[in-house]
Amino acid sequence: MSTRKLTNGHSNSNNNNNNDQFKRFKSNNNSSNDFPKNNLPNSGQNANGRSLSIDEQRHQLPVYKVRKQLLNKIASSKTLIVIGETGSGKTTQIPQMIHESIKVNVGIIAVTQPRRVAAITIAKRVALEQKCCIGDTVGYTVRFEDVTSPKTKIKYMTDGSLLREALSDKFLRKYRVIILDEAHERTINTDVLFGIVKEAQRLRMEKGLLPLKIIIMSATMDVDHFSKYFNNCEPIYLAGRTYPVKVLHTAETQSDYLNACLVTLFQIHKTIPVNHDVLIFLTGQDEIENLASQIRCIVKVSNELGGPMIRVFPLYAQLNQNKQLEVFQPSTNNYRKVILSTNIAETSLTIKGIKYVIDSGMVKRKMYDSVTGMDTLKVTRISQDQAWQRTGRAGRESEGFCYRTYTMNEYRMMPAVSVPEILRSNITATVLQLLALGINCRKFDFLDKPSDKDIENAQKQLYELGAITKPNGDELTEVGWNMSKFPLDPRFSKMLLSSIEFGCLDEMLSIVSILSGETIFYQSDDPDKRVEALKAHAKFESIHGDHLTVLNVYNEFKHAERHRTFCHENYLHYRNLEYARDVRRQLSVICERLQLKMSSCGNDYDQVRKCLLTGLYNNVAEMQQDHNFVSVTGRLKTKIHPSSVLNNKANLKFVLFTELVQTSMNFMRIVSSIEPEWIEEVVPNCGLSNRLSIFNQKVNEN
Ligand SMILES: Nc1ncnc2c1ncn2[C@@H]1O[C@H](COP(=O)(O)OP(=O)(O)OP(=O)(O)O)[C@@H](O)[C@H]1O
C-alpha cells in the first residue's frame, strides 16, 4: 500500500464523530448554486412508492412539461438552441418527441455526442424507451462500429462519425434533423461540425432540397455567442430539473487532490447506505489505477473488520469498450460501486445508482504552443461549466450530493467556460480533414477561428509531411489524400504510409496502434511489486528506445496467444494490449483498401527508427553537456521521462520523442535514439538539419 495517509490537515480518519466528517466541506450558503429542489420521489417510483413504467418515467421529466411549446418552436425554426438543466431530458427525449410528431416518414434524426460511450449507452436507453431492439428504430454509429439499419430513424453518433459522413456527402442528405448535443464541450470535431452542418443547411436551401433542421443543445453554454453564429437563431430555455443536488466545497485548499478524493470517499462510505454509488472525477489512467489500488487495499482491511464492500470500476477513453460498459450495470445490495473516471463521464451520461459525485476539479488537457510548435499534456483546473456538468452526473434518479475537493473561492477563480479545443490544440489534423472536404481552412466559417499563426503552422506541417502541394496551398497530394483516410494524427498516418519505403509496415502498424492507446506497462504502488515490475519490463527493453521496446512487448504478447497470464506475469496491461490489437486490425483494413503491401524489416531496426522520423521529425532533441536535452524545433529545455528505457543512458546524442508531458518540467515520453545523419537522409525538406546547424553554431558561440 502507498504511503498516502487517510488523513490530511483538515480531517481525521480516526475520528468517529459523524459531525466532524464534513468539516472539510462547506455547503454553498448561496443556495442558488445548489440545483433547485422540486420534491419529486425517487426515479422509478411514484409518491406512494409504486414502481413507474418506463413511459411514466419519461413523462416525469421536466422536458415533458413543455413538450407542445418545444415542438411548435422546433417546427417553426430552421435552427434552434435548447438550454436545459443536466438531467432534464434533452438528449433522450427531444429526439423521440420529434420522431413521434413527424408525420412524414422521411429522413433520420441524428444526435451527435462528443464521446462514443455516451452515444452507445444513450442509444441503448432510448431503444428501451421506444421498445425496439438497438439498431432498429434507434441505433448508433461510432468509430468502426455501425449499429443502424434501413429502419433507423433516431441515430446517436459521435461528432467524428458525422464528420466522416460529410466527406462523402456535404449535403448530409440522409438527415432531416441534426441535433448537436453537449455543444459547450467545444471539441475540435464539434466546432468543425458547426460549420459543416450550417453550410449543408444553406446548400440544401439553395438547391431546393428537403430543409435541414439544426438543434444545438447544452446545459451550460454561451448562448449569445452561439446564437450570433447561427444567424441570430432563438434560444429556448427549459425550466426545471429532476432532482436536487447538494453541492459542498472544502473549507480549505487541498494540496493533494488525489488524497482529498480518497479521504472524502471513505468519509462518505462510513455513513451512507451500501446501494448509494459514488463517481469520482480524476485526470487520467495512471491516476485512476493508482487510486483504485489504494481503495482496494483499504477495503481489503475494512472487509476483514466486517465493513461494507466496495467494487472499484475504472472509466477512461482507452479502456476496452466492454469494460467501459460494465460501469453501467446496476450494483447489487452487497457492495457499493465506486467509479473512477476521467472527464469521459462528465457530460451526457446517466449511470444508474450514482448518488454521490466527488470532483477533484482537475483535468488533463492537450495544449499547443504555437511558438515552440509543441503539443504538451498538462494537468490543469477545470472550468466552472465543467464543474456543473460533473455535478449533474448526480441527481438523475434521486436527490444527490457533489463533493468538490476545492474551496468555493477556488471555484470562483475558475474560468466560466473552457477554452475551445480548437484554440488550444495543434490543428494539423483539422486542416487536413477540411482539405479532404474541399474546404480551405482560412475561408471556413468557424465559431471561433484559430489564429493565422496556428493555421500557418498546420499548413507548414502538412507540406513537410508531403500532404499538400505548396507550403500555403490547399491542394492535397496523393499522400495527403491517403493520410486523410486514417482516423489518426497525420504524423502517425504519415509513418504508416512511409513504412512502405522502409519495408516495415508490419512493425509500424503495431507501434502506431500501441501509441494510439494508453500505456501497456503496469505500475504498482507496492514498492516490492514495483521492483518486480521493473525486472519484468526489462526483458523487453530495446537499446534503441521505447518504440522498439513496445514492439517487443506486442510481438511477445502475440506469441503468447494474447494470454492474460502472460500480461499478469509481466506486469503488462492486458486491456491496453487488447485495445492496441483492435486498433491494429482496423488500421490494417484501411491499409488493404489503400493497397499498401505488407512488409517486415526483420531485425533491421534502423528502418523502423528512420520511419518514425518521417512523422516525428519535429520532435527531435539533442543532448547538452549538462545531460539535459533541447528540442531542435522550438528549443525547449526538456528531459527524458523517468519511465523511458533511455532514461539515464549514456552515449545518447539525438533522440526523437512521441509527446511532451509537462509536470515539474517538460518531459519527453516514448523516446528513441536516432543518428543525426538520418535527418538529412530521411527528411531533407523539413528544414531540420538547417535548424540543427544554426543551433549548433549558437551553442558553440556561447
Ligand atoms: N440509462 C438510463 N437509465 C436510467 N435512467 C436514465 C438513463 N438515461 C437517462 N435516464 C433518465 O432520463 C433523465 C434524462 O436524461 P437525459 O440524458 O435525456 O438528460 P439531459 O437533459 O440530456 O442531461 P445532460 O445535460 O446531462 O446530458 C435522467 O436524468 C435519468 O433520470
Image (tube, rainbow, N blue to C red):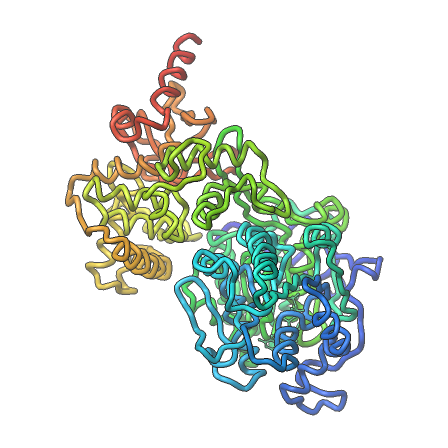
Left or right of 185? Residue 312 is: left
Depth order, front residue of 228/287: 228
Residue pictured at 32% horizontal, 35% vertical:
646
Left or right of 523? Residue 244 is: right
Residue pictured at 53% horizontal, 38% vertical:
368
Q: Residue furthest top?
A: 701
Is 556 placed above or below 131 here?
Answer: above
Q: Is residue 333 visible?
A: yes
State the image quarter where residue 340 is shown: bottom right
Is 197 placed above or below 431 here?
Answer: below
Residue 217: image location, x then y, percent: 66, 63
Q: Quadrant of the C terminus?
A: top left
Q: Is residue 10 visible?
A: no
Residue 636: image location, x then y, percent: 47, 27
Residue pictured at 39% horizontal, 12% vertical:
697
Residue pictured at 58% horizontal, 68% vertical:
210
Q: Quadrant of ligand 1?
A: bottom right
Residue 265: image location, x then y, percent: 61, 62
Depth order, front residue of 668/642: 668
Count how many numbered circles sit on residues in the image: 0
Residue 670: image location, x then y, percent: 36, 41
Depth order, front residue of 475/590: 475
Is 220 placed above or below 630 here?
Answer: below
Left or right of 213? Residue 428 is: left
State the image quarter where residue 623 is shown: top left
Depth order, front residue of 205/660: 205
State the image quarter where residue 351 is shown: bottom right
